[in-house]
Amino acid sequence: NGSSACVTMFVSPQPVEATDDAFWDQFWADTATSVQDVFALVPAAEIRAVREESPSNLATLCYKAVEKLVQGAESGCHTEKERQIVLNCCRLLTRILPYIFEDPDWRGFFWSTVPGAGRGGGDEDDENARPLAESLLLAVADLLFCPDFTVQSHRRSTVDTAEDIHSIDSCEYIWEAGVGFAHSPQPNYVHDLNRTELLKLLLTCFSEAMYLPPSSDSCNVNPWVQFFCSTENRHALPLFTSLLNIVCAYDPVGYGIPYNHLLFSDYREPLVEEAAQVLIVTLDYDSSTSSSPTVDGTTTGTAMDDVDPPGPDNLFVNYLSRIHREEDFQFILKGVARLLSNPLVQTYLPNSAKKIQFHQELLVLFWKLCDFNKKFLFFVLKSSDVLDILVPILYFLNDARADQSRVGLMHIGVFILLLLSGERNFGVRLNKPYSVRVPMDIPVFTGTHADLLIIVFHKIITSGHQRLQPLFDCLLTIVVNVSPYLKSLSMVAANKLLHLLEAFSTTWFLFSAVQNHHLVFFLLEVFNNIIQYQFDGNSNLVYAVIRKRNVFHQLANLPTDSQSIQKGLQRKKKTPEPISRTNSQDGVSMEGSRPAAPAEPGTLKTSLVATPGIDKLTEKSQVSEDGTMRSLEPESSQPAPEGNLPSTVSDGEPWSGEASHPRRDRRRLSSASSSGQWTPTPDWVMSWKSKLPLQTIMRLLQVLVPQVEKICIDKGLTDESEILKFLQHGTLVGLLPVPHPILIRKYQANSGTAMWFRTYMWGVIYLRNVDPPIWYDTDVKLFEIQRV
């Protein structure tokens, strides 16, 4: 049988002839294999041995496997035997390709042409012979729309001749209803399994990217993805649509009935996972280098309109950026929100739905949708549906905050919120009351989605692990961006903001790293925005500011002489905690919640490249009276007197000062010694202390503190509610400085984040494909695999 042929092949140093038909027929014809069997039968050591010692056998094997796939695609796989051969070739190539990619000498093999493999088969066709990779990709694309193998046949009877695979219009065979397709085909277990195997092979072809080290040069396109998503692939549109619809239409509850998944095995889920992974890999595209106007949302007209300038060459990115019908947006948003909320549903109806594991792929997909299709982004923000995305993201952020293996998840969640927060509508939507009681390990509160966001961010900053420090800038930038629109913060959220200010304005924190003071600038900006633009209705925050007024006075009187600076740094030695958790008054956590747990020791994780600093991630825009935004010139960047922020530390690097990249040497750390040679000087402190925006708050305190003290003395009050009532009816009209213009820091695409997304995405795919373990123990270069 095929398995013994397999062994013969691998052990034998004799070259096996490509023309030895008897050998090859036996080789492919094994019926009892699954992809797991192939992985067990063909051990890594033997693949490497044949690669080193009998390279011609390995070359012949790859060539013959591709040839069989091409033949299957040509013939349409009408017999059970042909289908079995196609699946076996598929499994074998999935097994072998990573070992081809890990060896630089072999990497070009699939891009070379094979003698005699011309399009007409004769020798004279060698000039226009296709590279093996192209033949393989086109065959897989054809096979994904093969009637009775991967799609329902449209023929009524068996008497009819079977459909000719070359004459069918694959747009009529899209796998699922949704974008651009109204008909939902009958689910077919076998077709789903076959599609899953073919997509696994496709993903393996694309994974060459894992074997190249991360580079700042985002131009290195993946040749496999580039070809597959080009006009050479006649199935590009139906395949893109099939993948998107299969993911967005999936309902893990199981035919919509709770607990139903316990009765039926769900064969759709592996296909959905595979589809999501293939989709995000095909969309790996650096939008910062593209001048495609469709990406920034400035085009008008109908989708696929001829007047649109040509979009990116990658057709998948092109199609994604041109979706425009409201009902398509609704379908995508509802689908992604339903799937992202799945783990939350688990918490209040345990086991009612199958728990899905591919939320990280969904977050990458959602990111791509918002980044490449601005009309989609505006649609998301148009109604409170955006909150169905926000709540699951906050749930994941809160749940993963103590787990070092989930640093990537924390980053992508924060990046998405940063992108959304650049739009005014997001801040406005946050005012909706929060009533869903998802059990989360946070204090109980009554309030809005804005309160939820601030409370979760506070939790991340005060009780996350140290690797999250680089995200503090991003978290506070999000709060600054939404602050001018927040109508009424709860007392719990107001106290959290002041607790952060207290923690960040201690002298040891301010003096211990070159950019720690930026966090104080961000928080002051939040208070100023709320006081200037949303004073009525924010009596809780005003009250909290009055109660903690000493923090603002201490900032205004921050010492700048050398002796005080040294003394401030000494104080650090007594408090090793990065941020004190005392006086945060956390109160009781929500019912049914579990504390955020650290990773199990030994958990595998993949390293990530560093993300750019907040000044590279965002650009400043000023909001004018009529609500429109205009971009500001970079040189006016206010909180960064020392020039660029250093880029943050990558997950794959040690936290100590010895950086593997000298230019990333300055990091936000709690101590000065480990962040290079930098030490704080009086001039340095003066340079930013003089710019602290304290005028508005000082004026507020000057006006309100005497009035509040008078009430307390007159009425012998110690009761908060009376003071709050007074503040609710008070006004500062005409007493505050002229309102400053609202500044929004909008996310801007850049090649640094494009590279980050590539390493993150492939790291997720590497770790999630364990059965079979496609890339396990191969020499991956894009990231390191580490144990927690």
Image (cartoon, rainbow, N blue to C red):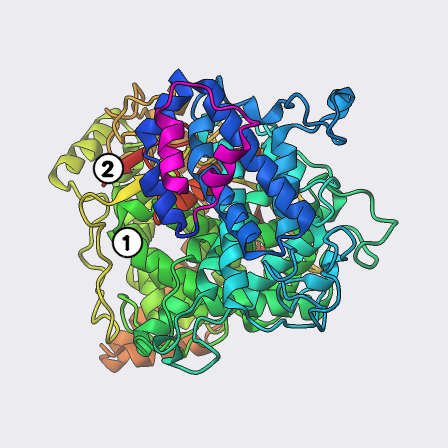
Note whether residue 48 is visible.
Answer: yes
Q: CA distance from mark 1 to mark 2?
A: 17 Å
Q: Quadrant of residue 703?
A: bottom left
Magenta stretch encompasses residue 11: yes
Residue at left offset 40%, top offset 77%: 436
Q: Residue at x 46, y 27 (%)?
A: 100
Q: Quadrant of the N terminus?
A: top left
Residue type at numbered disc 2: Trp
Q: Residues within 10 Å of mark 2 (few under 14, many from 20)?
A: many
Q: Nearer the viewer, mark 1 or mark 2?
A: 2
- Judge whether residue 632 can be spotted in this image: no
| Residue closest to the eye, 644 or 609 | 609
Residues in magenta? Answer: 1-30
Q: Which residue position holds label 1?
A: 550
Q: Position of residue 767 (x, y in %)?
A: 36, 45
Query: The disc labelled 1 sits on which kind of residue?
Result: Asn
Q: Residue at x 27, y 39 (%)?
A: 509
User: Dot 1 lies on which element?
Assistant: helix
Question: Looking at the picture, how far across and down is residue 185, in whole percent?
Answer: 63, 71
